[in-house]
Image (cartoon, rainbow, N blue to C red):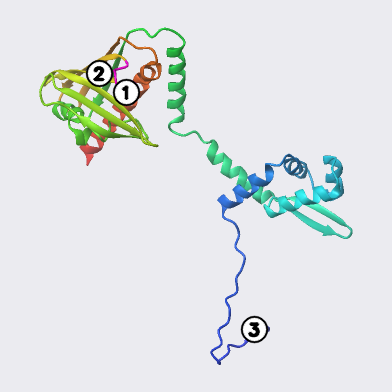
Amino acid sequence: MSAGTEPARSSGAQTAAVQTPTSPTPTALVQQALAALGEPNRFRIVELLAERPYSVGELADALGSLQPQTTKHLQALEAANLVDVRRLGRRRVAGLRRDTVGILARHFHRLAVPAADDAALAEYGRAVEREEGGPSDDRTLHFTRTLDASAQDVLEAWTDADVASQWWAPRHFTVLRHEWPRRVGGPIAIALGEGGGTEYRSQGELLSRTAEGMTFELAPLGPDGEPLFSARHLVTVSGDGPTTLGLTIEVTGIRPGAAPAVAGLGPGWSQLLDQLQDLLRRRAVG
């Protein structure tokens, strides 16, 4: 039996479990530190302590405040694990907790790493600004992809709801509705959902369908339920695994207020076709 250890009691009496304080998680530590640093004087104290340790009196002079006020700021920073205050004889000296600052630095370094969608959002923002800066003219967009699938499978990826739901939506959106007619002249209806319950609807008509491709009208609807513009899509396929897909979109009759939708056509369809390409590649190797 080690010194200072109390022998177990045989009387059946229950002994209370010893509770040891737990250190805050990294996330809680970051939150506590940011809350403390939100006060300007405390932020200034941390900046000063980054240079060297300061006594409480020196900090009060640097801040132009009274020592009791400075002490309260230090207590808040100490509670947030940002500083240590040591009593050295008659002096109290504060030093920066650089381990906590390191946790903050690593946390924000991770936040500073660019995400996959940053460039797409910036490109879309610039496109909207260009569209809103002047009259929206008719235009034609062209896209090409090489796909690891037969021509028939490529076309079915557009018309089969189960397959289309896996690629026909930008990242962070979902396909809520995909209705494709079996006959030429039938209506097309597509609805995409975004977080928060927002829904974006498009409608159109299948104009032609052959083994080499298809032509259809499809345009987003405005708040009034009417198309924001006319958009004729020509889809062509050539080869048979790999298959070359061509997409041409002719945009006409652009209504006022349609700038965001028009601006999104280029980056939006580029992303969708990339997703189609990835989907068919995975299916080919799976």
For the residue pair 195 and 54, the one nearer the viewer reads as 195
The x, y position of residue 188, in whole percent, is: 20, 24
**Which quadrant of the structure image shows residue 63?**
top right
Assess whether mark 3 and mark 1 are in contact (beta carbons under 8 angstroms): no
Assess whether mark 2 and mark 1 are in contact (beta carbons under 8 angstroms): yes
Q: Residue placed at 27% from the left, 24% from the top?
A: 202
Q: Residue placed at 87% from the left, 48% from the top?
A: 57
Examine the residues drawn in magenta and state their main secondary structure: loop
Q: Which residue is mark 2?
A: 247
For label 2, the SS is strand
For label 3, the crowd category at 10 Å Cα-Cα, with few meaning under 14, some 14 to 19 and many 20 or more, is: few
Amino acid type of the residue that numbered disc 2 sits on in the rendered structure: Leu
In space, the residues marked 1 and 3 are separated at their CA atoms by 73 Å
- Horizontal placement of 11 versus 270: left or right? right
Amino acid type of the residue that numbered disc 1 sits on in the rendered structure: Trp
**Magenta residue check for 188:** no
For label 3, the SS is loop
Indicate which label's residue lies in the foreground, 1 or 3. 1
Q: Quadrant of the C terminus?
A: top left
Q: Magenta span covers which residues? A: 221-228
Q: Residue placed at 44% from the left, 18% from the top?
A: 128
Please, which residue is most extreme toward the bottom here? 11
For the residue pair 161 and 102, the one nearer the viewer reads as 161
- Horizontal placement of 66 versus 249: left or right? right
For label 1, the SS is helix
The x, y position of residue 259, in whole percent, is: 40, 16
Q: Which residue is mark 1?
A: 269
Vertical placement of residue 227 versus 113, above or below: above
- Horizontal placement of 61 versus 201: left or right? right
Q: Which mark is residue 5?
A: 3
The x, y position of residue 207, in whole percent, is: 15, 16
